[in-house]
Amino acid sequence: MIEKIRKAFENYQQEMLDDLASLIAIDSSGEEPSGEGMPFGEGPAKALDCFLKIARRMGFETDNVDNYAGVVSYGDGKETVGVLAHLDVVPAGKGWTTDPFEMVIRDGNMYGRGVIDDKGPAVAALYGLRIIRDLGIPLKRGLQLIVGTNEENGSKCMEYYVAHRQPPTLGFTPDASYPLIHGEKGSFWAKMFFDKEELPILTMEAGEVFNAVPAECTVILDGSVDIDVLQASADKGFSEGYPVTVQKTPEGNICMVVKGKAAHGSMPYLGVNAIVSSAMILCDALGEKAGKLLHFVRDVIGRDPYGKTAGVYFKDDNGELTLNLGLLRFENGEGWLGIDIRFPVTGTGAYAAGLFHAMADKYGARVQIPTPSEPHFVPEDSELVTTLLQVYRDVTGEQNAGSMTIGGGTYARHVGKKIVAFGPEFGDTDYHMHNADEFYPLEEYIKHCVICTMGMLRLAE
């Protein structure tokens, strides 16, 4: 059966890549409503419409859940197997060597925003559904491909879906790593506000989302700052080898742009945070005139991705807390920080948020924390985990492959207790997710297609 499915994907490959390219061409990074029926903006709504049209072209029954999510269904049964993918993406950002919204295949790799996170896996699951139908295999459980439009900004799409439709009995989301993720840390996004100060910093801005390490920070300082002193601080290596430019503006101010390395917010240790680099430079150059916010960034957050210096760290046998400083906005003497916290599966949102509030109080900051997302955990001996792990072993030949827990949050936690994350990443490859030049090797993509389809089939048979 594995070889039959592999052969079917090879036969469909060009058509599948063309469909994926049509989705990549849509910038679906919007979040704000932009008209009636577009809860997360025009881009996500367009991507959902495009995807469901592709499914209907194949002859599948579809359901548009008010542009929050879409469902493609096949087969009958009181129980259903769900595959959960998302069509929204993080903003393209800077530094691409190709157009982020034009899928390019170069040296055996697919490039484009969403090729691996998560439009590529969504298309793979749709073609997997088509192949299962083509093969005419009897199923005991129905199959549903559920695609959302707000995963990168809080998964409000899945909250809406669960409130308006019956969730699947069990299933998986191809939006993490192989071999299998049976546990996900809890998380929350916090905003920290600092009191207004009279500083020589006019504006400062970095980051586009909470859940990514910012790769650039731009600072505008007034003309009272000694540009030579600032340049000397910039030359001291605080940016970990990434470029820093300092120059006069036509208005007589100073513009400093600090580069870093982007990474996913669940793994901040893989990036170099441009906000932290900027704070180190400015505190060195300005001293007390850099203000409380930047001294907090330098001295309390610093290069520590685990929150140990801040006093919010804890761990369990499955993992440890991580802290990512994803956003900074400063203007007119007032600023705030956007921080992404991921905490261990045995912790609770109340406990983790309590640590954060206590830390903020200690440093005189005000905090906004939405309701935390609680951890998600599926036992390793469950039917779901054992079946999918065996699929992975059968397709790859890796007989010792086991499950794990991660800091990333997926749709699994929003839909039910019998959902896990399964693929699409292999090994320790940096696919540049949430970064410039996001890519997915075509050979790995086809392998994922086979694993995903076999997983759907085994759970539904």
Image (cartoon, grey):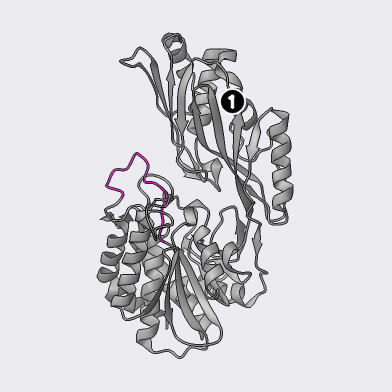
Q: Residue 253 appears at what percent x and percent y?
A: 38, 14
x, y percentage for residue 10? 30, 74
> Eyeballing the image, is 196 above or below 316?
above
Q: Secondary structure at mark 1?
A: helix
Side (left or right) of 141 relative to 447: right
Q: Is residue 78 left or right of residue 62?
A: right
Residue 444 visible, this orientation: no
The N terminus - image quarter: bottom left
Residue located at (53% from left, 29% from top) = 276
The answer to which of 380 and 328 lies nearer the viewer is 328
Residue 12 covered by magenta stretch: no
**Few, some or many C-alpha atoms within 10 Å of disc 1 (few <14, some 14-19, many ≥20)?**
many
In the displayed orientation, state which residue is furthest to the front. 36
In the rendered image, residue 177, in percent from the top left (x then y), is placed at 51, 60
Give the main secondary structure of the magenta stretch: loop
Is residue 364 positioned above or below 53 on the image? above
Q: Which one is nearer the viewer's eye here, 278 or 351?
A: 351
Please indicate, yes or no, whether residue 374 appears anywhere in the rendered image: yes
The magenta region covers 87-100
Residue depicted at x 37% and y 60%? 45
Give the quadrant of residue 442: bottom left
Residue in the image at 55% along x and 46% along y: 267
